[in-house]
Image (cartoon, rainbow, N blue to C red):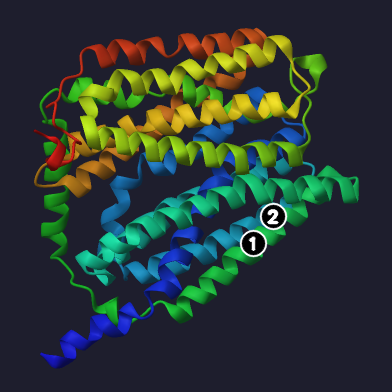
Amino acid sequence: MSESKQEPQATKRNLWFWVPSLYFAEGIPYVIVMTVSVIMYKRLGISNTDIALYTSWLYLPWVIKPLWSPVVDLVKTKRFWFVSMQFVIGVSLACVAFTIPTSNFFQLSLAFLWLMAFSSATHDIGADGFYMIALNQSEQSFFVGIRSTAYRIAMITGQGLVVILAGQLETNFGDVFQAWMVTFWVLSAMMLFFSAYHFLIVPKSFETEERKDRAGFLTDFWQIIQSFFRKKNIGLALAFLLLYRMGEAQLVKLASPFLLDEAGVGGLGLSTSAVGTLYGTIGIIALSVGGILGGWVVARKGLKYWLWWMIAALNVPNLLYVALAVYQPESFTVIGAAVAIEQFGYGFGFTAYLMYMIYIADGPSKTAHYALATGFMALGMMLPGMVSGWIQEILGYQLFFFWVVLSAIPGFVVVKFMDMPAEFGRKSNDAG
């Protein structure tokens, strides 16, 4: 008995050495695939139609992630998966760097970014699974805020520091292709370092984690999927997941190209470094404040009370992009304020989305059902994003952002029919 009690204490001393770094490493490939790739392709001369279509396809691994999660459970260990995926991601980043100077860099780099996206989604499964195995319940509660902070720091690093670095290298080299090649070499070195670091630091004592009977596990898995689609009002729930962010899914793909494009084609003509500052610092801070406030108000009044306010907060600030496209201000302060308000609204409004996924996942298989909900969440970003560039190039930026605002209407219609207990999400001491 004494040895079994000492083991958690032995690993607890090491948690600070690998939990924050693990979730920082989890965030980096995601932000590179979803955000940095858009900016890179814009700077390398790819059209908005192609950028939106092909980078939106990169959501696919997260859409279908729940379908191969049993493989991570049945083959090898969670530690093996996230360490090896970090290595694959590092190699993929190096391959992107190799392809940038080539004549067919777009097709080749997309192939390696897709490999990185698949590896990143697999990494998420392994890392989250290991976190639940290696930490007891009190440790999980304590470190949940720390892992979230580490992930947000990764977002700041990717959307901010990495883009600023690329912009500075563009200025220093006078060659956009060389600047982005060096940037991806730096990212590759970072991920390869994390792979080696976690291989050495993360405790191996949990590699004997419990295995389930393989045939029984797969049978249970398919039963869990079927039970998800038998939930009450599941059609309305899926419509909510797919339509709630329909406008934002299109905006997010074209916001950076809009900021980077010259005024002559309707953009604001900002530098790469300026865009990195806007979204990587100002935007992330506003997003985080909005998310924190959203969580606080839901805890006080419940999700049902705040649902209308949150979908409005998510979509109404998009009118600022209409104004930016019409007036094309040159003031960085004005542009920064618009981005901050939009990102704050997104952070506040997205709280309702996350809480609703928790609501529909509730039940005996809540972990697996929540994973399935995240797949539909990714699909809700992927499908509108795929056509957003094509729509923008037909309409121009002014009408496109107006279209983005109109795209919120289906989400409002679905919300009108939503129903849930008034106390859901509210702290028990506020429930009365």
Q: Residue at x 9, y 47 (%)?
A: 364
Counting the numbered discs, the total is 2
Q: Residue 431 vs residue 392: left or right?
A: left
Q: Which residue position holds label 1?
A: 188
User: Mark 2–mark 1 contact, CB under 8 Å?
Assistant: yes
Q: Residue 312 vs residue 107: left or right?
A: left
Is residue 100 something that shows in the picture?
no
Give the quarter of the image for residue 89: bottom right
Q: Which residue position holds label 2?
A: 184
Relative to 415, is 180 above or below?
A: below
Q: Nearer the viewer, residue 98 or 397?
A: 397
Is residue 218 something that shows in the picture?
yes
Give the quarter of the image for residue 322: top right
Residue 266 x, y percent position in the rendering: 74, 15
Residue 425 x, y percent position in the rendering: 20, 36
Relative to 181, is 234 above or below?
A: above
Q: Nearer the viewer, residue 258 or 431?
A: 431
Relative to 368, is 71 above or below?
A: below
Give the quarter of the image for residue 331: top right
The furthest residue to the bottom: 2
* Three-letter amino acid code at the position of disc 2: Phe
